Image: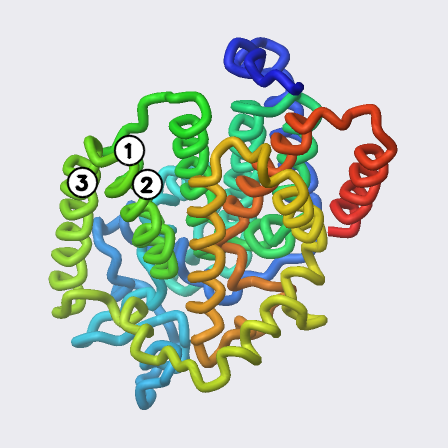
Amino acid sequence: MFDCAFCASSWLHGRDLAVCVLLFAFTYSIFVLSPVQQPADSLYSMMVSQSIIERGTVALDHYKFPNLTPVQSKKFHSNSSIYHLDLIDGHVYYYYGPGSSILSVPYVAIMNAFGVYASNEDGTHNPAGEMRIQTGLAALLMAGLAVVFFFTSRVVLPLTWSVAIALGGTLGTQVFSTATRALWAHTWMIFLLGFVVLLLVGQELKGRRLSPVVLASLLSWMFFVRPTAVVPIIVISVYIGVFQRDLFVRYAATGAAWLLLFVIYSWHNFGQLLPNYYRLGAQLRTHSIWVAMLGNLVSPSRGVLIFVPSLIFVGYLLVRYWKYVQSRRLVGVSLTVLVLHLILVSSFPIWWAGFSFGPRFLTDVVPWFVLLAIMGVQAMLIAGEHRTPVYKTQVVLGMGLLAAS
């Protein structure tokens, strides 16, 4: 039988910290040196950060947008000729969620100190400066996420498997192809979600006390970054309410306080309870949902099972070693979030996520993929088949699928 008891004592030993440094440096170097960049929806988000630093406001009125004109309200974008920007009562705002811009303020301030700005001296947009800020911060966050994945794995897994899962979770998923190519909203969201998963694993598998205030705050800021965070918020809230009832009051109160602040922010700036971007739920449709779900799963250009085939191996491990899975509640939470998120994004008319590479809309659930991988590998090791041909064969196949990913 595989004994994970050593993991609790060696979790933060010097060897693990050294591995973390190497893991961070290795993934950061790859992310920074990879030449492909794709800002798209994230353009102008760093101008908001700069506006907060310089003017104390998220409004972009003091910048110049020569080609900005009002247009008839679009179904899925803003009401201006630059789809990233919203025109509301004579003011200019960034259309997408404010969370990324607010959370990025410290990094933008540092870059400003080194002479890198998202705008030029005349107030016009500086795309080159913005992309330096975005790609640098995205690389830092996703290299940090690799370390979070490693520590999450080390709660229950040996060192070698933890490194494999951390590398697979970053280099073999949309973390690399999407979240590091610019500072997409996905980037900050999965960075925060990585810590949520770490807290849940520590609570479930090692009995570490879960902080309801920290958990609710992380989930709230995920929502401020990207509205699809509503799915894990609902599922985890049910989990806390059913299995951690002594924490629920503080968890709910913290979440309610953050939501109230968000409503006040929206009312102050836009005169409505939620920003326009958060009202896209009215556009959800189900008439072609099965086509969209198949597309998100197996499309040659968008299918997550095509681009991340290592998920097939994870599914195989969970099925084959189900009786050895140590936390079926965590597996249930993960699978519930995955299914509901797939339904949500497949209900959106532009389910293919526009001009992008791979399953971009499923970037939001990568930390749940990693959690399922941890549960599956742990179950396989507990089954004690280390010396059998079946074990060796399936590990080789699994590594092959990971390499393909």
In depth, the one of 400 and 218 nearer the eye is: 400
In depth, the one of 292 and 313 nearer the eye is: 313
Query: Tag 3 or tag 2, which sits nearer the N-term?
Result: 2
Distance CA(mark 1)–CA(mark 3): 9 Å
Residue 295 image point, x, y percent: 61, 74
Distance CA(mark 2)–CA(mark 3): 10 Å
Residue 272 image point, x, y percent: 14, 69
Residue at 69%, 59% (x, y): give it.
307
Horizontally, is 285 left or right of 318 in the view?
left
Q: Residues within 10 Å of mark 1 (few under 14, many from 20)?
A: some
Of the residues shown, which amino acid type is indicated by label 3? Thr
Check residue 182 in the rendering and tell me which mark sits there, or answer none: none
Q: Residue furthest bottom?
A: 72
Residue 221 image point, x, y percent: 31, 47
330 shown above or below 234: above
Horizontally, is 142 left or right of 252 in the view?
right
Residue 345 image point, x, y percent: 46, 69
Q: Residues within 10 Å of mark 2 (few under 14, many from 20)?
A: many
Q: Where does label 2 land, which residue? A: 218
Of the residues shown, which amino acid type is indicated by label 1? Val
Q: Residues within 10 Å of mark 3 (few under 14, many from 20)?
A: some
Q: Where does label 3 land, which residue? A: 254
184 shown above or below 172: below
Residue at 47%, 48% (x, y): give it.
334
Do the residues bearing badges 2 and 1 touch, measured as CB atoms within 8 Å?
Answer: yes
Q: Where does label 1 land, which residue? A: 214
SS at mark 1 in the image:
helix
Residue at 31%, 28% (x, y): give it.
210
